[in-house]
Image (cartoon, rainbow, N blue to C red):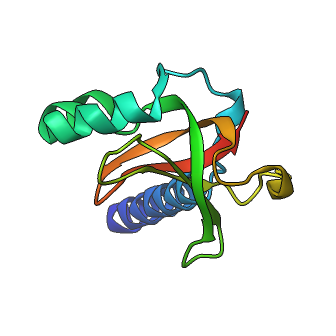
């Protein structure tokens, strides 16, 4: 009798654990527009910090909400279909690559090369460019 009670309790606890895991995995993320910026700087300054000391800049900016000011260099579509706006770093070899959130309703026709803009996103570090994800144009 005691073994059945213990087995039932274990099954109930496993079920609760699975439900919590499923809920947390599918929990929607907050929109970046509603989050407070941890840092606000120019695209050039952000890229220069990563270029000078990538490890220190990664420790400082990784997974932080950053508001970046810069001029549009290119607009493209990524592998997932999201729009990517690259901001010019004024002579740097790379750029700040901002992948817009799918839920963002941004009129892209107002952006052309050289257009000044402010974009807020979550820093994902540096590959060839400094990458910001889940971005929204301010």
- Residue 109 in view, yes or no: yes
- The quarter of the picture where the N terminus appears is bottom left
Residue drawn at the location 38% of the way across and 67% of the way down:
7
- Residue 31 in view, yes or no: no
Comparing 93 with 124, the one in front is 93
Q: In the displayed image of the protein, which residue is found farthest to the bottom?
A: 79
Counting from the top left corner in percent of width and height, residue 72 is at 60, 48
Q: Give the number of marks.
A: 0
Q: Quadrant of residue 74?
A: bottom right
Q: Quadrant of residue 59?
A: top left
Seen in the picture, residue 6 relative to 62 is either above or below; the reply is: below
- Left or right: residue 100 versus residue 52 is right
Residue drawn at the location 45% of the way across and 35% of the way down:
43
Residue drawn at the location 35% of the way across and 60% of the way down:
2
- Left or right: residue 106 versus residue 30 is right
Q: Quadrant of residue 44?
A: top left
Counting from the top left corner in percent of width and height, residue 64 is at 42, 32
Residue drawn at the location 36% of the way across and 60% of the way down:
6
- Left or right: residue 136 versus residue 132 is right
Counting from the top left corner in percent of width and height, residue 16 is at 52, 55
- Left or right: residue 73 versus residue 127 is right
């Amino acid at each position: 009798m005691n073994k059945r009670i213990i087995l039932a309790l274990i099954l109930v606890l496993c079920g609760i654990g699975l439900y919590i895991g499923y809920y947390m995995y599918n929990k929607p993320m907050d929109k970046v527009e509603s989050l407070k910026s941890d840092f606000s700087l120019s695209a050039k300054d952000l890229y220069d910090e990563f270029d000078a000391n990538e490890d220190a800049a990664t420790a400082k900016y990784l997974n932080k909400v950053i508001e970046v000011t810069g001029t549009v260099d290119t607009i493209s579509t990524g592998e997932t279909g999201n729009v990517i706006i690259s901001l010019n770093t004024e002579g740097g070899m790379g750029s700040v690559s901002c992948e817009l959130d799918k839920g963002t309703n941004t009129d892209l026709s107002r952006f052309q090369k050289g257009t000044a803009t402010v974009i807020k996103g979550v820093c994902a570090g540096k590959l060839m460019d400094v990458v910001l994800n889940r971005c929204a144009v301010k």
